[in-house]
Each structure stands twice: as structure tokens, then as C-alpha cells.
Image (spheres, rainbow, N blue to C red):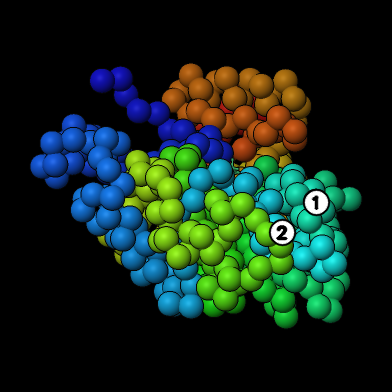
């Protein structure tokens, strides 16, 4: 087997080695079933146990009450951009959106297809290098939508806004990175491929009364109520991705839960930001809004950035190229990135800096 490298890609992203090894061990015959999870009926006892435990793991890790449903859907976070206003925003209603980056902007575009959108705050003028300080919220908004972590810009909310209307958060790139009080939210959603598992499943945590809201006639598959009433089994769910998400959440529980995970994530990010905050590397992001999941920085020139990325790759550090829309360097250091990956990266950064400056 060829050696594994440290993969700093933004998504699909690295997974815990333990999870991959367990999946590998059970690949040909899942717990004596004589077949893999990919091949078994979603109505089988074995799969029922997998999806039930995956949901129970989320409830345990985040302390989610029975007022909320935990759904495993398809279509990615991008489908949620449309499904949210389709289900929750009437034609003459207004939803508040905070524009903190290109993912927010995509969500805003979809909402405009269904109702009125108020941009309650935006950091667009600042090239999305910060989280807006104050919001101008609508009096009777249908909901308020935020992007908790901006995967491309490298910004992150450290505390969430207080809103009268149900708060909805796209947590695609930071769900389960720390404890979150779910009762403060109407809905939380996340595509799995950043911090939860492989692509193909989208986790939706939605307050049950919101899931029942009907503002227009929608297709069966695009109604939250369908998936709540069928326990994500109205049709064939993405079985294998759900299975991996179950293993990842088992791993998180085994690690000591989200308090422990947050402590580890903070330590990892601090190490990296300490190296960035010198004369050579520079962070474009306002200090208090820096993401501890997607760390972005610049070098003195674009040529040096290219050289940095190529040279890092040759040492087994991959996926460090910034998003094509912003350039620079980005290290995605989600839950599954081990501390050794950060150590290897910061060692490389020190060496590169001393060679080039
Ligand atoms: C990656 C990402 C998305 C898009 O997710 P898909 O599952 O590919 O649709 C949406 N929001 C954020 C914050 C992301 O990081």
C-alpha cells in the first residue's frame, strides 16, 4: 500500500484513519452479513441500526431535543439553498440573509426565486475578510440565514446572532467542530464532505414545527415534512455515506465529544496562526473572525505561493491551494486533520520562510 499523505483539501476532505480502517475491515462482509453496506437493502435490520445510531450520535453530541428532527438527505447543501425558501418563505414574506461569502451569495440567489430577501449584513465590500458586526433585521422575517463558517474566505462566527425569527445556519464546513446550542436555531444543515464524512449525504437538523410549515405546494421529495415523517427513508437514502457519518460520529464520541474536539481544534489552529502572523506570511482575515477550520493566508508574491504549494506537495502536504476565486493558500484543518499534520505543515512553513526571506 502506498503511504497516506496529509490532505488539507477543503472538501471532500480527509477522514479519520480509524474510520477508514473500520470501513475497510467491514467492506466485504458487514458484521457477518455476508455483504457490504453498499449492497444491502436500506430496509434491512443492519442498515436500520446504522441510520438509527447515526441519528442518536448527533443527538448525543449536540444535545438535540425531541423538538428537532435529524435528517439525512441528498442533493448537497446547495439543494438546501433552494429547499429552505421553498418550504419556509412565502411569496410575500421576507427572509433575512447575511452575506459573508460566495456560499451565502448562492443561498441568497435561490431565496430570491421564492420570496423577498433582506441583506441584513454583508462583508462583500471588505472582500469577505470579516463577519459583519451589526445586523439590520426585518421585523417579521420568515427566518434569518447565516453561513457559520466561510470555507473560501476563512472567516467564522465565534458567537451566533440573536434573532427573533428562526435562525438557520449553513454549517457545512464547521458542524460538530464544537458544542452548539441547537435550541437557538430553527435549522442547521451541512453537506457531509467537509467535516462529517464523504459527499452524498446532507445532514439537516430542523425544528419539527418549522418542518410542517406550508407556504406553497412543493414536490414530495422537496418537502421537509416528507422526510421527517419517513425518518429519511421516503426513498433510498445515501446508505454508504450515512454509514461513514455514523463511524465518524462514533469516533467523535470516543474522542470525548465536542468539548474535547473544540479544544483540539483550537490548539491546531493556534499553532498555524502563530506561524502565519510574522513578516513573511500574512492573514487577510480580521483577527477575531478567523476560522479555525479553513485557515487562509498569503505569501509576498503569487510566484512564491505557487512554489510553496508545489514544494509542500512534494513533501506530502496536499490540497493547500486557495480557492480559485481568491488565490493564496488555504489549509482546511477540519476535525479529522491530525495534530501531526499541523506540525508537519508548520515545520515546512518555517523551512520555506527561512529559505525565501
Ligand atoms: C461546500 C459548501 C457548500 C456546498 O456544498 P454541496 O454539498 O457541494 O452542495 C455550501 N456551503 C458551504 C459553507 C460549503 O462549504
Q: CA distance from mark 2 to mark 1?
A: 8 Å
Query: Is 262 drawn above or below residue 222 in the view shown?
Result: below
* Left or right of residue 205, residue 306 in this image: right
Q: Quadrant of residue 20?
A: top left
Q: Quadrant of the N terminus?
A: top left
Secondary structure of the residue carrying tag 2 is helix
Q: Is mark 1 within 8 Å of ligand 1?
A: no
Q: Which mark is residue 85?
A: 2
Q: Residues within 10 Å of mark 1 (few under 14, many from 20)?
A: few
Q: Residue at x 56, y 54 (%)?
A: 220
* Left or right of residue 220, residue 118 in this image: right
Q: Name the residue furthest left.
A: 32
In this view, the residue in front, 53 or 6, is 53
* Left or right of residue 336, residue 168 in this image: right
Residue 249 visible in the snapshot: yes
Query: Is 183 drawn above or below residue 192 in the view shown?
Result: below
**Residue holding disc 1:** 113
In this view, the residue in front, 109 or 248, is 109
Q: Name the residue furthest right.
A: 125
Q: Quadrant of the C terminus?
A: top right
Marks 2 and 1 close (CB-CB < 8 Å): yes
Where does residue 155 sit, x and y in percent of width and height? 68, 53
Q: Residue at x 81, y 78 (%)?
A: 140
Q: Residue at x 56, y 39 (%)?
A: 10
Where does residue 246 sit, x and y in percent of width and height? 33, 52
Query: Is 244 drawn above or below residue 356 in the view shown?
Result: below
In this view, the residue in front, 17 or 250, is 250
Where does residue 315 sit, x and y in percent of width and height? 46, 23
Q: Residue at x 75, y 33 (%)?
A: 325
Amino acid at each position: 500500500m502506498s503511504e497516506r499523505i496529509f490532505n488539507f483539501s477543503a472538501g471532500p476532505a480527509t477522514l479519520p484513519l480509524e474510520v477508514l480502517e473500520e470501513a475497510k475491515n467491514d467492506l466485504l462482509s458487514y458484521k457477518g452479513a455476508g455483504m457490504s453496506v453498499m449492497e444491502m437493502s436500506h430496509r434491512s435490520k443492519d442498515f436500520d441500526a446504522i441510520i438509527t445510531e447515526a441519528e442518536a450520535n448527533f443527538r448525543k453530541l449536540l444535545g438535540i431535543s425531541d423538538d428537532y428532527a435529524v435528517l439525512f438527505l441528498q442533493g448537497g447543501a446547495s439543494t438546501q439553498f433552494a429547499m429552505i425558501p421553498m418550504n419556509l418563505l412565502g411569496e410575500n414574506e421576507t427572509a433575512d440573509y447575511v452575506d459573508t461569502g460566495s456560499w451565502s451569495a448562492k443561498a441568497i440567489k435561490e431565496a430570491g426565486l421564492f420570496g423577498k430577501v433582506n441583506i441584513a449584513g454583508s462583508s462583500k465590500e471588505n472582500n469577505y475578510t470579516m463577519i459583519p458586526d451589526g445586523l439590520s433585521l426585518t421585523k417579521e422575517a420568515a427566518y434569518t440565514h447565516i453561513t457559520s463558517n466561510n470555507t473560501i474566505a476563512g472567516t467564522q462566527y465565534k458567537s451566533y446572532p440573536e434573532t427573533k425569527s428562526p435562525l438557520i445556519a449553513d454549517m457545512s464546513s464547521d458542524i460538530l467542530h464544537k458544542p452548539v446550542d441547537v435550541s437557538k436555531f430553527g435549522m442547521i444543515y451541512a453537506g457531509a464532505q467537509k467535516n462529517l464524512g464523504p459527499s452524498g449525504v446532507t445532514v439537516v437538523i430542523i425544528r419539527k414545527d418549522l418542518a410542517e410549515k406550508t407556504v406553497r405546494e412543493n414536490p414530495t421529495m422537496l418537502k421537509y415534512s416528507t422526510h421527517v415523517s419517513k425518518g429519511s427513508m421516503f426513498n433510498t437514502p445515501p446508505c454508504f455515506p450515512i454509514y461513514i457519518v455514523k463511524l465518524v460520529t462514533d469516533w467523535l464520541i470516543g474522542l470525548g465529544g465536542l468539548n474535547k474536539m473544540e479544544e483540539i481544534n483550537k490548539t491546531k489552529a493556534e499553532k498555524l496562526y502563530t506561524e502565519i502572523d510574522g513578516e513573511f506570511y500574512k492573514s487577510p482575515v480580521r483577527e477575531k473572525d478567523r476560522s479555525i477550520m479553513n485557515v487562509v493566508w498569503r505569501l509576498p508574491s503569487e510566484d512564491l505561493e505557487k512554489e510553496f504549494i508545489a514544494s509542500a506537495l512534494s513533501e506530502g502536504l496536499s490540497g493547500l491551494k486557495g480557492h480559485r476565486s481568491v488565490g493564496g493558500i488555504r489549509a482546511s484543518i477540519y476535525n479529522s486533520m491530525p495534530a501531526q499534520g499541523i506540525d508537519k505543515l508548520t515545520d515546512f512553513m518555517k523551512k520555506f520562510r527561512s529559505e525565501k526571506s
